[in-house]
Image (cartoon, rainbow, N blue to C red):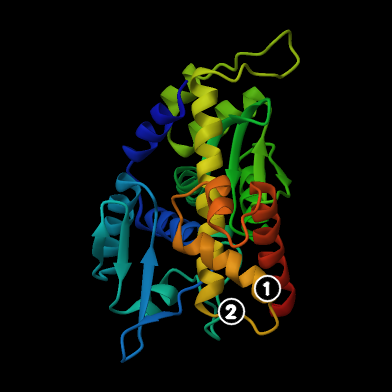
């Protein structure tokens, strides 16, 4: 089963209730915005929300949800990104992505976490469309790359309530939610709204070791996961640079600025642009230290 087939089936799924659609929209925004709604543009400092979802179908789906469920207009910047200018604070409040003091919620909004099975399944569906992959790291399974540890914990708890065993794993580019058991993978695919994918999904295991040949669909999944990891890092760096905390070393900020200005380049290509040039491991290390350092200062 190719991940593109799974995504196609999920994109065609339509929520049966408005609260499920709102849970999907809030989860998509949580993944896409990487923790900020307070960007401004222009001399008047009008609050804006830029959503680089990275997929035309995901942007179209989110635009419809914001327009239909919240009656807030959106502007398509391109096929793969949109902007909300009018009533951004209202959108933040109604999705519950900001608390009563205006602070961004680091995990999923309370109505999503406390929702019924259909709402939790909607959150998983949105998370998978935003940052999901089938197969990875030499193992058969399903993974989500999350924008924060709190988001990963929320989705792990949601999976447990849906009867699916999921684990949280920290990583360089962010925390991952991992579903390994084939039975659980089929269960979560069915819960998300991809019953055909659940029925057709069969891991190609080697002698029962859990290893998967890195070819075909898995090769594509690995490549997509790497692309999603780079995109998530770029989003987090861009959010940080919008309001960098005092005390972050200049060399780390310079590397972050290089990443933010060149989101389409690989780490190796970024290393060639650096002054002086660096290896891709050095670039990755600086980006990781930048995010960790900024998070410590914020805390």
Could you tell whether 81 is left or right of 23 in the image?
left
Of residue 188 and residue 283, the one placed in the foreground of this image is 283
Q: Are marks 1 and 2 in contact (CB under 8 Å)?
A: yes
**Label 2 packing within 10 angstroms: few (<14), some (14-19), many (20+):** some
Which residue in the protein does label 1 denote? 294
Could you tell whether 41 is left or right of 294 in the image?
left
Q: How many marks?
A: 2
Residue found 52% across the figure and 70% down from its top: 239
In the rendering, at what x and y percent does residue 47 appear?
37, 82
Of residue 84 and residue 258, the one placed in the foreground of this image is 258
Which residue in the protein does label 2 denote? 244
Of residue 272 and residue 206, the one placed in the foreground of this image is 272
In the rendering, at what x and y percent does residue 229 appear?
56, 47
Residue found 37% across the figure and 67% down from its top: 50
Residue found 40% across the figure and 58% down from its top: 25
Task: From this view, report whether residue 116 is shown above or below residue 47.
Answer: above
Q: Quarter-wise, where is residue 91 in the image? A: bottom left
Q: Is residue 157 in view?
A: yes
The dot on residue 225 is none
Dot 2: element: loop
How far apart marks 1 and 2 lie (CA) works out to 8 Å
Residue found at the far front of this picture? 276
């Amino acid at each position: 089963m190719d991940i593109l087939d799974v995504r196609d089936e999920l994109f065609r799924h339509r929520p049966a209730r408005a609260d499920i659609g709102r849970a999907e929209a809030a989860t998509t925004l949580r993944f896409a915005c990487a923790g900020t709604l307070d960007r401004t543009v222009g001399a008047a400092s009008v609050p804006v929300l830029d959503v680089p979802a990275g997929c035309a179908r995901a942007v179209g789906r989110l635009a419809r949800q914001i327009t239909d469920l919240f009656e807030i207009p959106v502007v398509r910047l391109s096929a793969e990104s949109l902007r909300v200018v009018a009533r951004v604070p209202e959108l933040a409040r109604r999705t519950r992505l900001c608390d009563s003091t205006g602070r961004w919620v680091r995990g999923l909004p309370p109505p999503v976490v406390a929702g019924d099975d259909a709402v939790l399944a909607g959150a998983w569906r949105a998370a998978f469309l935003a940052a999901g992959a089938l197969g990875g790291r030499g193992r058969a399974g399903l993974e989500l790359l999350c924008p924060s540890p709190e988001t990963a914990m929320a989705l792990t708890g949601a999976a447990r309530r849906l009867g699916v065993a999921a684990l949280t794993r920290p990583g360089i580019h962010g925390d991952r939610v991992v579903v390994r058991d084939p039975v659980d993978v089929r269960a979560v695919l069915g819960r998300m709204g991809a019953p055909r994918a659940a029925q057709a999904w069969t891991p190609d295991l080697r002698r029962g070791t859990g290893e998967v040949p890195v070819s075909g669909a898995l090769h594509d999944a690995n490549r997509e996961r790497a692309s999603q990891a780079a995109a998530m890092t770029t989003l987090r760096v861009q959010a940080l640079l919008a309001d960098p905390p005092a005390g972050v070393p200049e060399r780390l900020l310079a590397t972050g600025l290089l990443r933010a200005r060149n989101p389409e380049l690989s780490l190796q290509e970024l290393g060639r642009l650096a002054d002086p040039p660096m290896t891709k491991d050095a670039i990755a290390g600086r980006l990781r230290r930048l995010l960790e350092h900024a998070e410590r200062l914020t805390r």
